[in-house]
Image (tube, rainbow, N blue to C red):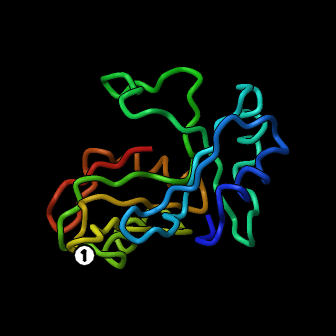
Amino acid sequence: LNFSTTSEALKAHFEQFGQISDCVVMTDRDLGRSRGFGFVTFEDPGSVNAAITMPTQQLDGRNVTVKKATREGSRQGGGAEPQGVEFNVVKVFVGGLPPSVDYDKLTGYFEKYGSIEDAVVMIDPGTQRSRGFGFVTFTDSSSVEACMQNYNSNEIDGKWIEVKR
């Protein structure tokens, strides 16, 4: 999301897909500014499907990616993906990053899988150090598939990194 997008603007945009019971733009509790993402809860589950049929939308002058959120721990063990749950097809979570990894190292490693639209290493606002995880958004879903094919051998600075959809 655009950092100036409010919860009201987010709600106004997504009301085109159905009645909304809750809508929030997530903010940094220390700085009070937007973290660049939010959540919309629809009253009717069919409205969710309507919204995610357009995975990329324009809001406040910025392309936003729309996907169905799942609660933490809702995935079943053994790497199985629950039926009916939709995942973002161009974005991956990268966990277990060594402290030495910055934006350049992250993109330098993942560009071998395809063109990168966006990438971020999450930083602790208090210490300004890496939190050990990040996200990579590719321009094409085949890049995500390539990452997943190499699940056991993804490594940066000699350390194995976990890549998840």
Q: Residue at x 58, y 34 (%)?
A: 86
Residue 78 in the figure: left or right of residue 33? left
Q: Position of residue 99 (x, y in %)?
A: 18, 69
Q: Residue at x 70, y 49 (%)?
A: 55
Q: Position of residue 31 (x, y in %)?
A: 41, 71
Q: Residues within 10 Å of mark 1 (few under 14, many from 20)?
A: few
Q: Residue furthest right?
A: 16
Q: Residue furthest left?
A: 158
Amino acid on which the number 1 mark rests in the picture: Gln
Residue 67 in the figure: left or right of residue 11? left
Q: Quadrant of residue 120?
A: bottom left
Q: Quadrant of residue 60?
A: bottom right
Q: Quadrant of residue 17?
A: top right
Q: Report which residue position mark 1 lands on.
A: 128
- In front of the other: 117 or 72: 72
At mark 1, the secondary structure is loop
- Location of the C terminus by quadrant is top left
Residue 146 in the figure: left or right of residue 62? left
- In front of the other: 86 or 124: 124
Q: Position of residue 104 (x, y in %)?
A: 35, 79
- In front of the other: 79 or 43: 43
Q: Residue at x 30, y 69 (%)?
A: 123
In the image, is residue 11 above or below residue 3?
above
